[in-house]
Image (cartoon, rainbow, N blue to C red):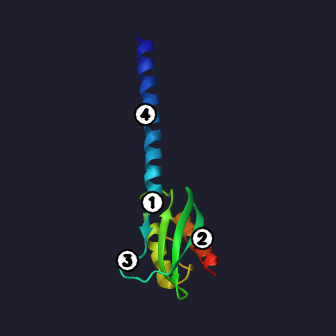
Amino acid sequence: MKKATLFVCLSLLLMVVFASQGMFDSAGEDISEETTSSNDEADVEVGEGFIGIGEGFNGEVEVEVDVSEGEIVKIEVLSHNETSGIADDALEQVPANIKEAQSTDVDVASGATATSEAIIEAVDNALDEAN
């Protein structure tokens, strides 16, 4: 009886471990496919797009920065593996703040410093490509 109980407990433990691993993998895949755009205007003139990459908390953050006549007109986060819920504010606020300020000298989002800094780094890299 003790062996059977031990076997059942170990089996349940293994199932929980494997099930939770699958959940994290699925979440990572879904998150990496998300896109976030700071472009709230439907009729914004889009200039030439430049790609930049920054290192986030969970890997690379890739952005596209559209520049027209020397001005940032659109910033779109193309891909990331940042944690949903924690990084959301940074993914929305930082690109919008950069566009508004026309500079990467902006504040980071509270609680999402690594993601904010990755976006800033990626935009800087894209702007370096533009120059």
Q: How crowded is mark 3: few (under 14 residues within 10 Å), some or many (20 or more)?
A: few
Asked whether, in this view, residue 65 is left or right of residue 92, the answer is right
First reached walking from the N terminus: tag 2 or tag 4: 4
In this rendering, is residue 116 above or below 80? below
Q: What element carries label 1?
A: loop
- Label 2 belongs to which residue? 121
- Label 1 belongs to which residue? 86
- Kindly identify which numbered label has been placed on residue 73: none
| Quadrant in which the C terminus appears | bottom right
Q: Position of residue 39 (x, y in %)?
A: 41, 76
> Does residue 111 appear in the picture of this structure?
no
Q: Residues within 10 Å of mark 4 (few under 14, many from 20)?
A: few
Real-space CA distance between mark 3 and mark 4, rounded to the nearest whole angstrom? 42 Å
- Label 4 belongs to which residue? 16
Q: Where is residue 44 in the image (x, y as percent from the top left)?
A: 40, 82
Real-space CA distance between mark 1 and mark 2, rounded to the nearest whole angstrom? 19 Å
First reached walking from the N terminus: tag 3 or tag 4: 4
Q: Where is residue 67 in the image (x, y as percent from the top left)?
A: 52, 81
Name the amino acid type tagged 3: Asp
Mark 1 vs mark 3: in front: 3
